[in-house]
Image (tube, rainbow, N blue to C red):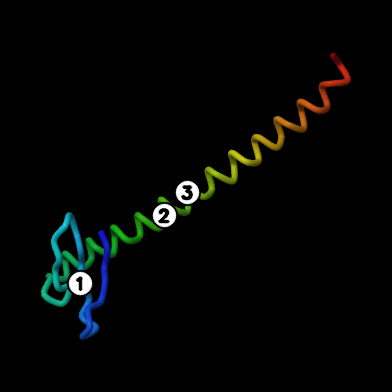
Amino acid sequence: MTEKKNQKNTPVLTFEGKKYNVDDLSNDIKETIKGLQIAETQLKMHEDTLKLLSIGRNTLANQLREKLKKYE
């Protein structure tokens, strides 16, 4: 789902290969579009958080590995 503006600054929704003039859509549909945009933003944020947690976990595992070397 992408929303673009054409030459006349009219917002256009591209969804599943079809284009829709946003101004022609009902308020209910516009609210659904906003909901999808929020969901996509939240998903991206949580994906980034998971990446950071994974990096942190790997760093801690590497630190533990180094500290345990003296016990081998």
Residue at horizontal 59%, vertical 42%? Answer: 53
Say which residue label 2 marks. 42
Say which residue label 1 marks. 12
Q: In terms of image quadrants, where is residue 34?
A: bottom left
Q: Are marks 1 and 2 in contact (CB under 8 Å)?
A: no
Q: Is residue 3 above or below residue 56?
A: below
**Mark 1 or 2: the one toward you:** 1
Depth order, front residue of 42/64: 64
Q: CA distance from mark 1 to mark 2?
A: 23 Å
Residue at horizontal 73%, vertical 31%? Answer: 62
Q: Residue 61: horizontal and vertical position, in percent?
A: 70, 30
Q: In terms of image quadrants, where is residue 65?
A: top right
Quarter occupied by the N terminus: bottom left
First along the sequence among labels 1 and 3: 1
| Element assignment for label 1 | strand
Say which residue label 3 marks. 46
Q: CA distance from mark 3 to mark 2?
A: 6 Å
Residue at horizontal 77%, vertical 32%? Answer: 63
